[in-house]
Amino acid sequence: MFPTCCRIPNSALSYSSVISSGEDMAGAAGGSNALFCKNMATSLVRKTKLLSNRAARIRVAKGDKPVTYEQAYHPHHIGHRKGWLSQHTSNLQGEDGAAERVVEDVFIRRFMYGTFHGCLADEVVIKRRGNLLLICAVMIQKLLPSKFYFLIGYTEELLSHFYKCPVKIEMQTVEEKVVYKYL
């Protein structure tokens, strides 16, 4: 059933003044009033809340909070000032498998965080080039180099068997976490 339309007086343009029956409001309103549907009035009230995007933003503090390059820029700067953390062709128009790539990326990131626990200095970048899966990461030097090499080989072999494609890990090590700037 379609929503009942009603007239809202100019003096009472608030959500609480919307009356569900059109006959009662039509008789009470009179004059040059705007015609609104009940659902439209509800959406107009909620519209201001939808436009306030605050997700994934780092709040500016006293200048003592260290942030990385990825955290320093807001989400709407992706593609302008910072790049995507997952590069593949499934997001192009007409391509299938975008949802599968997202699930695979989440699994790979969680697997990397679990395997190299406490050693990741920044976000993991996943690139797909043809059949090759390339994982780029910056690590903190908390382990011996021989343990890093073992974990790299372990991760490459296990992910290669999971996804039935060659997996390569490009890793760079730093002594401590890289601070881009302080907020």
Image (tube, rainbow, N blue to C red):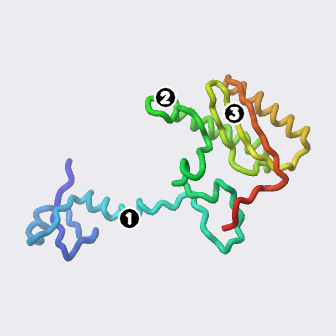
Quarter of the rendering occupied by the C terminus: bottom right
The residue under label 2 is 96
Residue 80 is marked as none
- The residue type indicated by label 3 comes to Leu
Say which quarter of the image contains residue 61: bottom right
Distance of mark 1 from mark 3, alpha carbons?
42 Å
Whether pointer 2 and pointer 1 mark residues with C-beta atoms closer than 8 Å, the reply is no
Secondary structure under tag 1 reads: helix
Q: Amino acid at mark 2?
A: Asp
Residue located at (81% from left, 32% from top): 154
Q: Which is more N-terminal, label 3 or label 2?
A: 2
Q: Residues within 10 Å of mark 1 (few under 14, many from 20)?
A: few
Q: Residue at x 90, y 41 (%)?
A: 145
Q: In the rendering, at what x and y percent does residue 3 appear?
A: 21, 53
Q: Quarter-wise, where is residue 40 in the image? A: bottom left
Indicate the secondary structure of the residue bearing disc 3: strand
Where's residue 159, x and y in %? 72, 30
- Image marks 2 and 3: residues in contact by CB distance under 8 Å: no
Query: For the point 11% across and 70% down, which residue is it?
Result: 32
Return the disc, 2 or 1, that comes first in the chain's sequence: 1
Residue 136 on image: x %, y %: 71, 40
Taking the image as shown, residue 152 lies to the left or right of residue 14, namely right
Q: As drawn, is 30 to the left or to the right of 74?
A: left
Closest to the camera, between mark 2 and mark 3, is: 3
Q: Mark 3 sits on what residue?
A: 134
Determine which residue is flagged by label 1.
48
Secondary element under disc 2, as helix, strand or loop, is loop
Give amino acid for label 1: Thr
Determine the residue located farthest toward the bottom in the rendered image.
11
Dot 1 or dot 3: first in sequence order is 1
In x, y percent, where is residue 17? 23, 71
